[in-house]
Amino acid sequence: MTDSGPGAGADSGGSPTAGYVRFVVLGGARTGSYMLVQALDSHPNVTCFGELFHWQQDHIDYNVAGYDDNSTEDKALRDADAGRFLRERIFCPRPPEARAVGFKLLYSHVWGFAGLLDRLIEDTEIRVVHLQRRNLLRMLVSTRLAQASGVWRVDRGFAPVQLLEQRTWLRALRRPGRALTALRKLLRPPPAPDPATKALTLSLDECRAYFFKARHEVTHFTRLFEAHPAISVCYEDLVKERNASLRGVQSFLEVPPARTTVTLARQNPEPLSTLIANYEELRAAFRDTPHTVFFDG
């Protein structure tokens, strides 16, 4: 990851003269966006910010070294003028090693900031990494479980092989508190949750409404950004063939292929029949419909 604070008085707006590719990781909740952002940000020539425009948070989720998540000045600027915030704090002048700079944008984030969506659509040089998930039932279950538990991601900290990498030690020196927490998690992994305690009961109407909404959002935002260079990435491919998927994204962002790091763990790997209390009822109801494929995994 290229660590660099913003350039003072930057007004380039991330134009071609900025010298790097600008991008957004676009998608819905529970599509593996945390995993993709973490992997991209670990690339030595990429800086990938977190949820900059999460309107329900009282801070900015930069998740990049050199930035203060709790900066009241940055938050005031973002809330008052999202476009200026992007120009001055995100897509600003950076050192030569920075080849791609971007941030995570969930579909729901655009509604909290006036003019943000229009600005992004108009700037057709911004590339779009459109993250999707094939199994919408899994996506719904993951969303409901996260809402119930309040836990949206599980990070097991530094993997053992990372401890030998120079950039990991540098990151640890910059963030000693976070590094210590990660090391504790590594040495003492959290116990696996008891699947029996988190089985959900889903109604047919809830499932139908969610499937419609999820598909509509993908289609809607694909059309909104149809003039932008874009690549589609599926959660299932990231999980099963992460290296191949990430090589495709790296090529799209015009950065050299490099090993990336992911320390996040899957939160709900159990079979859907375990996670859904009325699984058989739903499977029977959706038999002979396009949704029946969701019950295969």
Image: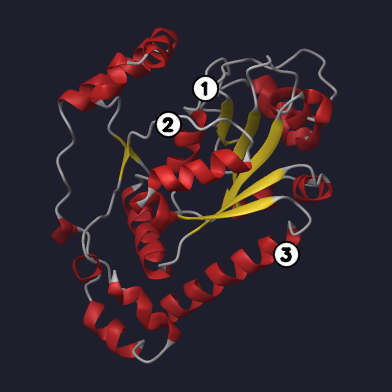
- Compared to 237, does 18 lie above or below? above
Asked whether disc 2 touches disc 3, contact meaning CB atoms under 8 Å apart, the reply is no
Q: Residue at x 57, y 32 (%)?
A: 48
Nearer mark to the viewer, of 2 and 3: 2
Q: Which residue is mark 1?
A: 44
**Residue 227 lies in quadrant:** bottom right
Q: Which residue is mark 2?
A: 260
Where residue 6 appears, x then y in whole percent? Answer: 69, 17
Crowding at dot 1, Cα within 10 Å, few <14 / some 14-19 / many 20+, comes out as many
Q: Which residue is mark 3?
A: 223
Q: Residue furthest bottom?
A: 288
Left or right of residue 97, residue 120 in this image = right
Give, as a three-letter code, the residue at label 1.
Answer: Pro
- Compared to 36, does 282 lie above or below? below
Q: Residue at x 43, y 46 (%)?
A: 244
Counting residues from the N terminus, which is met first, the one under dot 2 or under dot 1? 1
Picture colour scheme: secondary structure
**Residue 203 lies in quadrant:** bottom left
Q: Residue furthest top?
A: 173
Alpha carbon separation for disc pair 1 and 3: 32 Å
Counting residues from the N terminus, which is met first, the one under dot 1 or under dot 3? 1
Where residue 180 appears, x then y in whole percent? Answer: 29, 15
SS label for mark 1: loop
Q: Residue at x 50, y 38 (%)?
A: 37
Left or right of residue 155, residue 4 in this image = right
Alpha carbon separation for disc pair 2 and 3: 31 Å
- Identify the image quadrant of the C terminus: bottom left
Q: Name the residue nearer the viewer: 185 or 254.
A: 254
On residue 56, the disc is none
Asked whether disc 2 touches disc 1, contact meaning CB atoms under 8 Å apart, the reply is no
Give, as a three-letter code, the residue at label 3.
Answer: Arg
Q: Name the residue nearer the viewer: 222 or 141.
A: 222
